[in-house]
Amino acid sequence: MTQVTLKPEDINLNDPEIFERNQAHQVFDYLRNNEPIHWNPEGERNVGYWNITKYEDVMFISRNPELFISSKGITSFYPKDESELDEQMSGNGKMLITMDPPRHVRLRRLVNKGFTPRAVNAMEDHIREITNQVLDDVAKKGRCDFVLDVASQLPLAVICGMMGLEKKDWPYMFELTNKVLGQGDPEYQTDAPEELRGTPEGARIAGQMGTMQMFGFFAQQLQDRKEHRKDDLISLLVDSEVDGQHLTDEDILWFCFLLILAGNETTRNAISGGLLALSEHPDQRQQLQNDMSMLPTAIEEILRWVSPVTHMARVATQDVEIRGTTIKEGQRVVMWYPSVNRDEDIFPNPHTFDITRQPNDHLAFGIGEHFCLGAGFARLELKVMFEELFRRFPDIEKDGEPERLRSTFIGGIKHMPVKFTPEA
Ligand code: HEM
């Protein structure tokens, strides 16, 4: 990691290259210790915001959804010129994750059924079967791109399966997820003219096209389920009611949009980031492979270490003072999970990767009203993947440097070459 010299006035977390170059922890360490509530300057197109880097402050903000709302957007980006906000394309206030109480509570109660511990446990055999199919496809090769061939395939299959999507459509969902959540990365800006790739305009085009294509796809799926119900989440939503009223088509489409994004991109990065962390800490990896009963605590440490979702934003509904700084009504706060998960006031030796760490109350899944709905599925997918991966390929190792995603929102790895002894 290259050392960067920091001055508070130079810190600008709008810059995705900080994350792509894996330098964010240097910035976060500095902020936690010097300016835990730090004003991030506005960008060319977006408003300024408060960077929140301490654990207790993220707990406070997340647990007070009436003081800090989600319906004005959950990312650090918000346009200075509000006329830039395309009402139809903006999901603000329309998805579970961007809704405020009381509607959030009612909708969440409705969908919770599909995500209870019982529902999750019932999927274990199925998840193991998918995992082994994924591993079968690379078993004889001895090398692969771990992200494309393995880490992305399990979460994609699980969420697409829950939504009743046909297998032929899964690669398309992978492509669209990358466009929407990886819109800042030139690799996914395939809809933008060559000269715009790598620019904010290239990102805007990728995000917009990805969103429109996703809506086009799910509109067809919705039509199909209205005509022929299946045993899947989309059919469940068609028949559901909140406050005695059926969900509208728009409600259902935004829910599909959220699930497909949340369900595959995050878990993919926890799996690949987990293998990377274990490869970079061979003593920890050896301990785990000698005794796989340590997997539950190892998974929590992977989640803390990787923090696959980098931030969530909220907007203050009134002036609120935190650590002597006044957050003014209408201002944006951005909660940085990789930072709070290495807060030295909470985690002893926070920069040590320790698979036996306990307690480990990381906030990788958020906390409070919006706590990740899919946390149980993500944990189960991680467990089954590492059990099967180390059973079948105990010597799997990195075979080149990983390529990171250019994003301030998702802590992603796009490619990671690996090698292992092929199965006979
Ligand atoms: C390691 C994998 C995952 C991570 C790190 C992660 C992280 C998060 C975070 C940080 C939030 C927002 C919390 C907040 O705003 O306070 C969230 C919300 C959410 N996640 Fe996940 N997630 C993961 C996997 C999944 C999966 C597999 C699914 C679906 C199957 C999913 C579905 C959702 C949904 C629907 C929400 C919105 C909940 C609400 O607003 O009430 N996530 N997740």
Image (cartoon, rainbow, N blue to C red):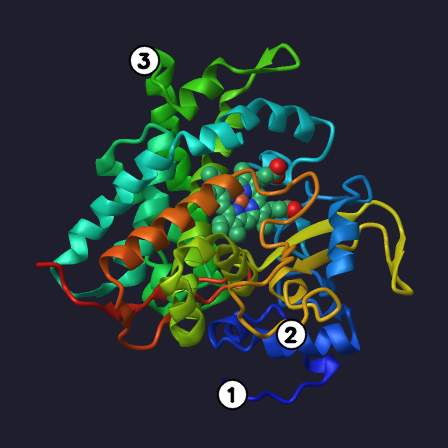
- Mark 2–mark 3 Cα distance, whole angstroms, equals 55 Å
The crowding category of the residue bearing disc 2, from other C-alpha atoms within 10 Å (few below 14, some 14 to 19, many at least 20), is few
**Residue 221 pos. (x, y %):** 35, 26
Q: Quadrant of ligand 1?
A: top right
**Residue 95 pos. (x, y %):** 58, 35
Q: Nearer the viewer, residue 223 or 391?
A: 391
Name the residue furthest left: 424
Whether ligand 1 has any atom under 8 Å from the Cβ at mark 3 is answered as no
Give residue 206's quadrant in the image.
Answer: bottom left
Query: Quick check: 56 left or right of 171?
Result: right
Residue 191 seen in this snapshot: yes
**Amino acid type, callout 3:** His
Name the residue furthest top: 244
**Amino acid type, callout 2:** Asn
Q: Which residue is mark 3?
A: 228
- Mark 3–mark 1 Cα distance, whole angstroms, equals 56 Å
- Mark 2–mark 1 Cα distance, whole angstroms, equals 21 Å
Whether ligand 1 has any atom under 8 Å from the Cβ at mark 1 is answered as no
Q: Nearer the viewer, residue 364 or 313?
A: 364
**Amino acid type, callout 1:** Thr
Q: Which residue is mark 1?
A: 2
Q: Which residue is mark 2?
A: 349
Q: Secondary structure at mark 1?
A: loop
User: Looking at the image, do the residues carrying marks 2 and 3 touch, with CB atoms under 8 Å apart?
Assistant: no
